[in-house]
Structure formats: structure tokens, C-alpha cells
Amino acid sequence: MAQISAAMVKELRERTDAGMMDCKKALVECDGDMEKAVDFLRKKGLAMAAKRAGRETTEGTIQCYIHAGSKLGVMVEVDCETDFVAKTDQFIDFAKDVAMHIAASDPMCIKREDAPQDIIEKEREIYAQQAKESGKPDNIIDKIVDGRIEKYLKENCLLEQPFVKNPDLTIQDLLNELVAKMGENITIRQFARFQIGA
């Protein structure tokens, strides 16, 4: 078994913002492997997020992002369970980061279940037509279309988009990490993106 040093715990804490004891436990569980420990903590955050998902979120914050030049702006509502969490710097910073991300990446919806079906069907028709015109056999066109729709949803649903400040993480990953840190259910309720001339 690997010796877990205070420096290793400190490094993991800096990389994940998890608590000291959680970092030490993750390193022990992963036999000192830093990358595995990061994944361990991320999965723990995912499990905690799933456990808290049913809780009602009646507190929160509305944050704005106005891009330089004032031609693009975003408002986002992020909700949590208590006003105590709603007032923390980490919660507010998360909401601000989400607003800035929305300005940069222009998602069509928060999660794939919210994607407008008429738009998905229109995309499906376009992809099918492109596949036919490129001479693909009929028996694989559906698979090609399904793959392209999957990619389209990942690119256009906020929670699945890679975070603009750190493309290794999705917005869902950031949300899960915040839920794990705060110990509360947190949801991105709604957003509005405004762009001059759009």
C-alpha cells in the first residue's frame, strides 16, 4: 500500500476542492494514484448529486454576464435548497461561470429532455438527406443519423457542453462537484441569452 503524504492530500485538494478527509480517503482507496483519486472524487460527487436530485430547490441566485461591448448578455437562474448556500461565494461564482459559458457557447436548452422535438426532427431529416446524397447504404443511414443527433445534442444542451474555461469538464461535471461540496441539490433552472441583432 502506498504511503499517503500530506503533500499528496494537498495536491488532490487543490485539484478538486474536495475536503481534506475526502481527499485522504480517495488516495487511500486508489493506492496513492492521483488520477484515479480525482476520478474517485468525481464519481462520489456524481453519486451525491443523484442522491440529492429529488430535493426541492426554492432558494438560489440570478446572475448576469454582459460581454465586452454590451452587445451580448445572459441571465441565469441557479437554485439550491437553502439561502445559506445561495449566499456562498462558490455558489455565486458557479452561477456567474454558467452565465459566461452560455454567452460563449449559445446552448439551445439546459438538458436534452428540453430540446425542442421539431428542431431535432428537422436536424434528423437534414442528416438523413446528407447521408443519402453521399451514397451511404440505406441499412446504415439510421445509425449515421442517430450518431449525428447524439453529437448535436451534446453540442447544444448546456449540461453536456464542455465548460469553456476547462473543456475537460462538462457543465454537468461542475454542477456535480458543487453539489458534492455544498451537500445540497442544485439546479440550473433557466437562462435567457440576448444578442443585439440576433
Image (cartoon, rainbow, N blue to C red):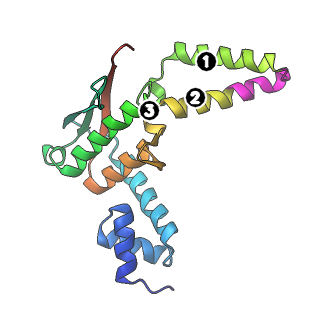
Q: Residues within 10 Å of mark 2 (few under 14, many from 20)?
A: few
The reply to whether residue 25 is visible in this rendering is yes
Instruction: Give amino acid for label 1.
Output: Glu
The reply to whether residue 186 is visible in this rendering is no
Q: Position of residue 22 (x, y in %)?
A: 34, 69
Which image quadrant is residue 69 in?
Answer: top left
Q: Residues within 10 Å of mark 3 (few under 14, many from 20)?
A: some
User: Left or right: where does residue 144 sit relative to residue 67?
Assistant: right
Q: Which residue is mark 3?
A: 105
Residue drawn where x is 29% and y is 26% of the image = 73
Magenta part of the chain? 135-145
Q: Is residue 178 above or below residue 55?
A: below
Residue drawn where x is 18% and y is 48% of the image = 85
Q: Camera-side residue: 29 or 161?
A: 161
Which image quadrant is residue 4 in?
Answer: bottom left
Residue drawn where x is 37% and y is 62% of the image = 16
Instruction: Give amino acid for label 3.
Output: Ser
Q: Residues within 10 Å of mark 1 (few under 14, many from 20)?
A: some
Q: Is residue 37 magenta?
A: no
Q: Camera-side residue: 68 or 163?
A: 68
Q: Is residue 49 above or below residue 72?
A: below
Q: Earlier in the sequence, mark 3 or mark 1?
A: 3
* Mark identifier at residue 152: 2
Q: Is residue 95 above or below residue 66?
A: below
Q: Position of residue 9 (x, y in %)?
A: 36, 75
Q: Position of residue 100 (x, y in %)?
A: 33, 37
Residue drawn where x is 27% and y is 40% of the image = 96
Q: Position of residue 102 (x, y in %)?
A: 37, 32
* Mark identifier at residue 123: 1
Which image quadrant is residue 194 in?
Answer: top left
